[in-house]
Amino acid sequence: MEDIRKVLEQTCAYAVQYVESCKDMPAFPSEKALAGVESLRGPMPEEPCDPCEVVDLLGKYAQPATAGNLGGHYYGFVSGSLLPAAHAAQWFIDTWNQNSCLYTGSPAAAVLEDIAEKWVAELFGFPEGTAMGLATGSSNCILIALIAARNELIRRQGWDVFKQGYKNAPSIRIVLGAGAHGAVRAALYYLGIGEEELEFVPIDEYGRMIPEKVPPLDDHTLLILQAGNVCGGAYDPLEKLIAKANKAGAWVHVDGAFGLWAAVSPNQAHYVKGIGNADSCNMDVHKTLNGGYDSSIVLCRDRRALRSAMEVGGSYLQFSEHRDNMGYVTEMSRRPRGVVLWAALKQLGKKGLADMIDNLCDCTSYFAEKMVEAGFVMTVPPFFNQFFVKCDTEEHTKAVLAKVQASTKAWSGSAMWDGEFVMRFSICSYKTTHQDIDESVAVYKAALDEVCGK
Ligand SMILES: *Cc1c(COP(=O)(O)O)cnc(C)c1O
């Protein structure tokens, strides 16, 4: 029998060392660290291995080859850090190893997810009775919401998808912005809906849907809006378009993977005014909330629509009068991620949550300003926690970004915007401070000066 105390204490030592050094951790692993993780390759071992040895291999060779998103110098993708209480909750749920599909599988998981559902619905201005599901990420939560939306729009036309299927069902229309995230396009594709069946709304230079270009809506239309463009952060005009959809009896879904968190701060809520009148929305726990991977929220105003869309039967499944988590998502056995969400919200409270979001926004505008002062070109102002910049030529932008990425002192990614290569920044770690930004700007400026021969 292995000595579990030894295994866990050893793991704890590595974890504490990691977290305590994350302020100054490399934003991206060095060549040496990358070689370290590669050294783990080899054939599947014949013989068992002491778990302590496994821990050592992970600690020595995998841990140094991680991206620095726990720290303050990482601006890639939209990657959050990890709040202490969420971190601790992750450890608890790994320890408990609960199957949170049913109340009977884990009462703790069911009750905490139930509490979190009520808190989240209130935070985003959704009415009492709103249903929440928790899945791996927004990709999955968008798919879940769109299944509920499609089934409900068809049901209202007198058709039962569960019994009659989708092949001969009454048609629905799908309207979305030309700037919709790839995850939305993917969800529609998974649903068997082709690009030519979609009605795309043109977007402005910031990536926002142009409201005058939205076609007339009706009660068999699904309107998909975006709260936070993944490059520049801009928001579709939610209030106007949600009201328009409500009036027409359309179903309106809002993809707000990171940007919807604006709703929790009185200073940022203007971005997402009207969100409480949407039919459904999704937002990640692992992005702006800093609540850890892999966790995302789907909210659905019509509880019955979500429940019936996620219908699963099985004589061995013992449903209860309590919350049965599997009734809200496409997963049965899974980690009790509601425990982690609960812990993150409990740690912050409404005040701490608003302050954290305000700080990300403040850091973003500060960062953008300093980059312009340093000589970078900004064509779209920052929105929420995102912005992007470029150099005078594409060649220079690429060279500067490559230099910064190789430095391991700061890390940001790239994107194409309006046919142009840009460096994009997402300030998503609650650990990022003005000092981190000053240090990072110095790295970008040094690279710019070197590339442009100043
Ligand atoms: C990140 C993101 C997604 C995909 O979310 P995952 O959690 O990575 O699956 C979808 N939409 C937007 C706007 C995003 O930023």
Image (cartoon, helix red, strand yellow):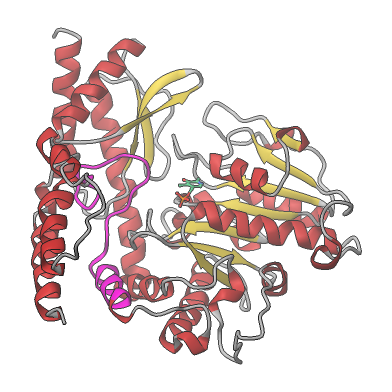
Residue 237 visible to an observer of this rendering = no
Q: Residue furthest front?
A: 46
Q: Say whether residue 204 is left or right of residue 433.
A: right
Residue 202 image position (x, y, % from top left)? 66, 29
Residue drawn at point x = 63 percent, y = 32 percent? 178
Residue 154 image position (x, y, % from top left)? 83, 58
Residue drawn at point x = 61 percent, y = 92 percent? 321
The C terminus appears in which quarter of the rendering?
Answer: top left
Looking at the picture, does residue 170 appear above or below residue 424?
A: below
Segment tinted magenta in the rendering: 67-94
Residue drawn at point x = 82 percent, y = 59 percent? 165
Residue drawn at point x = 28 percent, y = 21 percent? 376
Q: Say whether residue 129 is left or right of residue 120.
A: right
Residue 341 image position (x, y, % from top left)? 39, 70
State the residue in front, 92 or 173: 92
State the residue in front, 159 or 49: 49
User: In which image quadrant can residue 109 be found?
Assistant: bottom left
Prevailing SS of the magenta stretch: loop
Residue 205 visible to an observer of this rendering = yes
User: In which image quadrant can residue 8 be found?
Assistant: bottom left
Q: Residue furthest right?
A: 158
Is 96 covered by the magenta stretch?
Answer: no
Residue 387 image position (x, y, % from top left)? 38, 34
Q: Say whether residue 211 is left or right of residue 218.
A: left
The N terminus appears in which quarter of the rendering?
Answer: bottom left
